[in-house]
Amino acid sequence: MVKQNKWPLAKEAVELIAGRFKVLSEPIRIQLLQSLHDGPMNVTDITRAIASTQPNVSKHLKMLQEAGLITRRQQGNTVYYAIADQSVYKLCDVVCASLKDKFTEQSGLFG
Amino acid sequence: MVKQNKWPLAKEAVELIAGRFKVLSEPIRIQLLQSLHDGPMNVTDITRAIASTQPNVSKHLKMLQEAGLITRRQQGNTVYYAIADQSVYKLCDVVCASLKDKFTEQSGLFG
DNA sequence: TAACTATATTGCTATATCGGCATATTGTCA
DNA sequence: TGACAATATGCCGATATAGCAATATAGTTA
Protein backbone atom coordinates (compact mmCIF):
# COMPACT_ATOMS: atom_id res chain seq x y z
CA MET A 1 0.00 0.00 0.00
CA VAL A 2 2.13 2.79 -1.34
CA LYS A 3 0.85 6.31 -1.51
CA GLN A 4 1.45 7.44 -5.06
CA ASN A 5 2.45 10.84 -6.31
CA LYS A 6 2.18 11.88 -9.91
CA TRP A 7 3.44 9.23 -12.30
CA PRO A 8 5.50 9.13 -14.26
CA LEU A 9 7.68 11.59 -12.40
CA ALA A 10 9.25 14.39 -14.42
CA LYS A 11 12.84 13.91 -15.40
CA GLU A 12 13.95 16.66 -13.07
CA ALA A 13 12.08 15.09 -10.18
CA VAL A 14 13.77 11.78 -10.86
CA GLU A 15 17.13 13.48 -10.71
CA LEU A 16 16.34 15.11 -7.40
CA ILE A 17 15.20 11.82 -5.95
CA ALA A 18 18.33 10.06 -7.14
CA GLY A 19 20.37 12.90 -5.71
CA ARG A 20 18.82 12.41 -2.31
CA PHE A 21 19.66 8.72 -2.42
CA LYS A 22 23.17 9.58 -3.47
CA VAL A 23 23.66 11.69 -0.38
CA LEU A 24 22.64 8.67 1.66
CA SER A 25 24.80 6.24 -0.28
CA GLU A 26 27.93 6.58 1.87
CA PRO A 27 28.25 4.64 5.10
CA ILE A 28 29.95 7.51 6.87
CA ARG A 29 27.03 9.80 6.15
CA ILE A 30 24.58 7.26 7.49
CA GLN A 31 26.73 7.08 10.59
CA LEU A 32 26.73 10.84 10.91
CA LEU A 33 22.97 10.95 10.72
CA GLN A 34 22.74 8.21 13.29
CA SER A 35 25.00 10.01 15.71
CA LEU A 36 22.68 13.02 15.49
CA HIS A 37 19.64 10.92 16.20
CA ASP A 38 19.45 11.76 19.89
CA GLY A 39 20.25 15.43 19.59
CA PRO A 40 22.69 18.03 18.27
CA MET A 41 26.39 17.37 18.50
CA ASN A 42 29.54 19.30 17.75
CA VAL A 43 32.14 18.24 15.24
CA THR A 44 34.72 17.05 17.72
CA ASP A 45 32.28 14.78 19.50
CA ILE A 46 30.90 13.46 16.24
CA THR A 47 34.42 12.72 15.06
CA ARG A 48 35.06 10.67 18.16
CA ALA A 49 31.71 8.93 17.90
CA ILE A 50 32.28 7.60 14.43
CA ALA A 51 36.02 7.08 14.60
CA SER A 52 36.99 9.12 11.58
CA THR A 53 39.12 12.20 11.00
CA GLN A 54 37.90 15.71 11.63
CA PRO A 55 38.40 16.99 8.07
CA ASN A 56 36.53 14.03 6.69
CA VAL A 57 33.69 14.50 9.12
CA SER A 58 33.46 18.19 8.32
CA LYS A 59 33.37 17.47 4.64
CA HIS A 60 30.52 15.00 4.89
CA LEU A 61 28.59 17.14 7.35
CA LYS A 62 28.75 19.90 4.82
CA MET A 63 27.28 17.66 2.16
CA LEU A 64 24.46 16.65 4.46
CA GLN A 65 23.79 20.26 5.26
CA GLU A 66 23.76 21.33 1.65
CA ALA A 67 21.24 18.58 1.01
CA GLY A 68 19.05 20.08 3.71
CA LEU A 69 19.25 17.03 5.93
CA ILE A 70 21.00 18.68 8.86
CA THR A 71 21.37 22.20 10.22
CA ARG A 72 24.47 24.04 11.38
CA ARG A 73 24.64 26.31 14.39
CA GLN A 74 27.82 27.98 15.50
CA GLN A 75 28.32 28.84 19.13
CA GLY A 76 31.65 30.39 19.93
CA ASN A 77 34.17 28.35 18.08
CA THR A 78 32.28 25.13 18.24
CA VAL A 79 29.70 24.13 15.67
CA TYR A 80 26.63 22.09 16.44
CA TYR A 81 24.92 20.05 13.80
CA ALA A 82 21.39 18.75 14.17
CA ILE A 83 18.89 16.75 12.17
CA ALA A 84 16.74 18.92 9.93
CA ASP A 85 14.78 16.19 8.19
CA GLN A 86 13.45 13.26 10.16
CA SER A 87 12.50 11.46 6.97
CA VAL A 88 16.02 10.10 6.70
CA TYR A 89 15.30 7.80 9.60
CA LYS A 90 12.15 6.66 7.94
CA LEU A 91 14.14 5.85 4.83
CA CYS A 92 16.66 3.85 6.81
CA ASP A 93 13.90 1.94 8.53
CA VAL A 94 12.23 1.05 5.26
CA VAL A 95 15.54 -0.21 3.89
CA CYS A 96 16.23 -2.15 7.07
CA ALA A 97 12.86 -3.86 6.85
CA SER A 98 13.45 -4.72 3.22
CA LEU A 99 16.88 -6.15 3.91
CA LYS A 100 15.58 -8.11 6.83
CA ASP A 101 12.83 -9.58 4.68
CA LYS A 102 15.32 -10.49 2.03
CA PHE A 103 17.67 -12.26 4.39
CA THR A 104 14.83 -14.00 6.19
CA GLU A 105 13.57 -15.28 2.87
CA GLN A 106 17.03 -16.47 1.92
CA SER A 107 17.59 -18.27 5.19
CA GLY A 108 14.23 -19.94 4.66
CA LEU A 109 15.67 -21.64 1.63
CA PHE A 110 17.53 -23.89 4.05
CA GLY A 111 14.55 -24.92 6.10
CA MET B 1 6.74 8.64 14.40
CA VAL B 2 9.52 6.48 13.13
CA LYS B 3 9.63 2.82 13.99
CA GLN B 4 13.09 2.18 15.36
CA ASN B 5 15.26 -0.82 14.88
CA LYS B 6 18.29 -1.56 16.97
CA TRP B 7 20.48 1.50 17.50
CA PRO B 8 23.16 2.11 16.86
CA LEU B 9 23.20 -0.11 13.82
CA ALA B 10 26.16 -2.41 13.35
CA LYS B 11 28.81 -1.24 10.96
CA GLU B 12 27.92 -3.96 8.51
CA ALA B 13 24.27 -3.01 8.61
CA VAL B 14 25.17 0.59 7.89
CA GLU B 15 27.11 -0.53 4.86
CA LEU B 16 24.22 -2.57 3.54
CA ILE B 17 21.87 0.34 4.00
CA ALA B 18 24.22 2.71 2.21
CA GLY B 19 24.58 0.13 -0.53
CA ARG B 20 20.85 0.03 -1.06
CA PHE B 21 20.77 3.80 -1.36
CA LYS B 22 23.65 3.66 -3.78
CA VAL B 23 21.70 1.40 -6.08
CA LEU B 24 18.95 4.00 -6.08
CA SER B 25 21.30 6.92 -6.59
CA GLU B 26 21.25 6.90 -10.38
CA PRO B 27 18.39 8.56 -12.26
CA ILE B 28 18.31 5.86 -14.89
CA ARG B 29 17.74 3.20 -12.27
CA ILE B 30 14.89 5.15 -10.74
CA GLN B 31 13.43 5.41 -14.22
CA LEU B 32 13.79 1.69 -14.75
CA LEU B 33 11.97 0.97 -11.51
CA GLN B 34 9.25 3.38 -12.49
CA SER B 35 8.75 1.77 -15.85
CA LEU B 36 8.19 -1.55 -14.08
CA HIS B 37 5.64 -0.07 -11.75
CA ASP B 38 2.61 -1.25 -13.69
CA GLY B 39 3.91 -4.69 -14.52
CA PRO B 40 6.72 -6.72 -16.06
CA MET B 41 8.39 -5.46 -19.22
CA ASN B 42 11.01 -6.76 -21.61
CA VAL B 43 14.30 -5.05 -22.30
CA THR B 44 13.38 -3.67 -25.70
CA ASP B 45 10.23 -2.01 -24.41
CA ILE B 46 11.98 -0.66 -21.36
CA THR B 47 14.70 0.76 -23.58
CA ARG B 48 12.10 2.59 -25.61
CA ALA B 49 10.25 3.74 -22.53
CA ILE B 50 13.19 5.47 -20.96
CA ALA B 51 14.91 6.60 -24.14
CA SER B 52 18.28 5.04 -23.47
CA THR B 53 20.44 2.44 -25.22
CA GLN B 54 19.90 -1.27 -24.88
CA PRO B 55 23.34 -2.09 -23.46
CA ASN B 56 22.99 0.62 -20.88
CA VAL B 57 19.55 -0.56 -19.88
CA SER B 58 20.74 -4.15 -19.60
CA LYS B 59 23.63 -3.12 -17.41
CA HIS B 60 21.49 -1.20 -14.98
CA LEU B 61 18.79 -3.84 -14.93
CA LYS B 62 21.45 -6.30 -13.91
CA MET B 63 22.50 -4.10 -11.02
CA LEU B 64 18.92 -3.80 -9.85
CA GLN B 65 18.49 -7.52 -10.06
CA GLU B 66 21.67 -8.25 -8.16
CA ALA B 67 20.41 -5.92 -5.46
CA GLY B 68 17.25 -8.00 -5.25
CA LEU B 69 14.99 -5.17 -6.36
CA ILE B 70 13.77 -6.77 -9.57
CA THR B 71 13.43 -10.29 -10.96
CA ARG B 72 14.42 -11.68 -14.33
CA ARG B 73 12.38 -14.16 -16.33
CA GLN B 74 13.43 -15.38 -19.73
CA GLN B 75 10.83 -16.48 -22.22
CA GLY B 76 12.19 -17.50 -25.57
CA ASN B 77 14.72 -14.93 -26.48
CA THR B 78 13.06 -12.07 -24.70
CA VAL B 79 13.63 -11.29 -21.05
CA TYR B 80 11.02 -9.87 -18.73
CA TYR B 81 11.97 -7.92 -15.66
CA ALA B 82 9.57 -7.26 -12.82
CA ILE B 83 9.57 -5.54 -9.45
CA ALA B 84 10.65 -7.81 -6.63
CA ASP B 85 10.61 -5.30 -3.80
CA GLN B 86 7.79 -2.81 -3.52
CA SER B 87 9.63 -0.92 -0.82
CA VAL B 88 11.50 1.02 -3.47
CA TYR B 89 8.31 2.90 -4.26
CA LYS B 90 7.83 3.63 -0.62
CA LEU B 91 11.34 5.05 -0.51
CA CYS B 92 10.68 7.25 -3.51
CA ASP B 93 7.48 8.52 -1.97
CA VAL B 94 9.16 9.41 1.30
CA VAL B 95 11.84 11.30 -0.59
CA CYS B 96 9.25 13.04 -2.74
CA ALA B 97 7.36 14.18 0.33
CA SER B 98 10.54 15.45 1.93
CA LEU B 99 11.56 17.36 -1.17
CA LYS B 100 8.11 18.82 -1.54
CA ASP B 101 8.20 19.99 2.07
CA LYS B 102 11.57 21.55 1.54
CA PHE B 103 10.56 23.47 -1.53
CA THR B 104 7.27 24.54 -0.02
CA GLU B 105 9.14 25.89 2.95
CA GLN B 106 11.57 27.71 0.72
CA SER B 107 8.85 29.28 -1.38
CA GLY B 108 7.21 30.39 1.85
CA LEU B 109 10.21 32.60 2.48
CA PHE B 110 8.83 34.91 -0.18
CA GLY B 111 5.33 35.26 1.22
C1' DT C 1 22.90 -24.68 -40.75
C1' DA C 2 22.29 -19.73 -41.79
C1' DA C 3 20.12 -15.49 -40.94
C1' DC C 4 17.84 -12.85 -37.69
C1' DT C 5 16.32 -10.96 -33.18
C1' DA C 6 16.88 -10.02 -28.27
C1' DT C 7 19.87 -9.49 -24.66
C1' DA C 8 24.41 -9.49 -22.35
C1' DT C 9 29.25 -8.45 -22.04
C1' DT C 10 33.61 -6.24 -22.80
C1' DG C 11 36.84 -2.52 -23.54
C1' DC C 12 37.17 2.20 -23.44
C1' DT C 13 37.36 7.18 -21.87
C1' DA C 14 35.69 10.62 -18.95
C1' DT C 15 34.12 12.10 -14.68
C1' DA C 16 33.05 12.00 -9.84
C1' DT C 17 34.27 11.35 -5.29
C1' DC C 18 36.50 9.12 -1.38
C1' DG C 19 40.05 9.51 2.36
C1' DG C 20 44.37 11.53 3.90
C1' DC C 21 47.28 15.33 4.61
C1' DA C 22 48.53 19.99 5.06
C1' DT C 23 46.89 24.29 5.94
C1' DA C 24 43.62 28.15 6.29
C1' DT C 25 40.10 30.33 9.00
C1' DT C 26 37.73 31.76 12.93
C1' DG C 27 36.88 32.28 17.78
C1' DT C 28 38.64 32.38 22.65
C1' DC C 29 41.44 33.66 26.29
C1' DA C 30 45.64 35.07 28.69
C1' DT D 1 48.46 40.72 20.21
C1' DG D 2 49.94 35.89 20.52
C1' DA D 3 48.99 31.18 21.46
C1' DC D 4 45.66 27.84 21.29
C1' DA D 5 41.39 25.20 20.03
C1' DA D 6 37.68 24.06 16.79
C1' DT D 7 36.31 23.76 12.30
C1' DA D 8 36.74 24.27 7.24
C1' DT D 9 39.12 24.07 2.89
C1' DG D 10 42.32 22.82 -0.85
C1' DC D 11 45.15 19.49 -3.00
C1' DC D 12 46.33 14.88 -3.95
C1' DG D 13 46.28 9.93 -5.59
C1' DA D 14 43.32 6.10 -5.94
C1' DT D 15 39.09 4.06 -7.08
C1' DA D 16 34.45 3.58 -8.90
C1' DT D 17 31.20 3.95 -12.35
C1' DA D 18 28.65 6.24 -16.11
C1' DG D 19 27.75 5.97 -21.13
C1' DC D 20 29.33 4.61 -25.65
C1' DA D 21 30.61 1.43 -29.28
C1' DA D 22 31.68 -3.00 -30.68
C1' DT D 23 30.91 -7.61 -30.14
C1' DA D 24 29.51 -11.93 -27.97
C1' DT D 25 25.79 -15.03 -26.70
C1' DA D 26 21.57 -17.38 -26.99
C1' DG D 27 17.01 -18.31 -28.91
C1' DT D 28 14.04 -18.55 -33.12
C1' DT D 29 12.80 -19.64 -37.60
C1' DA D 30 13.39 -20.60 -42.45
Image (cartoon, coloured by chain):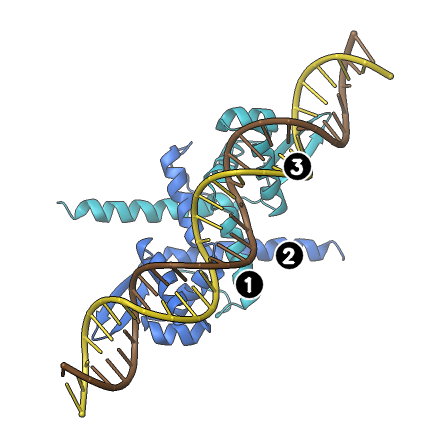
Chain colours: A cyan, B blue, C brown, D yellow
Q: Residue at (50%, 26%) from the top-left corner?
A: A49
Report the Cα–Cα distance between label 1 and label 2: 12 Å
Residue A4 pos. (x, y %): 46, 64
Q: Please say if A48 is above or below A107.
A: above
Q: Please say if C29 is above or below C5.
A: above
Which circle, 2 or 3, is nearer the viewer?
3
- Mark 1: amino acid: Ala
The residue singled out by tag 3 in the image is A72
- Mark 2: amino acid: Phe
- Mark 3: amino acid: Arg
The residue singled out by tag 2 in the image is B103
Write down the chain letter for disc 1.
A
Write down the chain letter for disc 2.
B
Q: Residue at (50%, 50%) from the top-left corner?
A: A22
The residue singled out by tag 1 in the image is A13
Residue C12 pos. (x, y %): 44, 59
- Mark 1 packing: few (<14 Cα in 10 Å), some, or many (20+)? some
Residue B107 pos. (x, y %): 70, 58
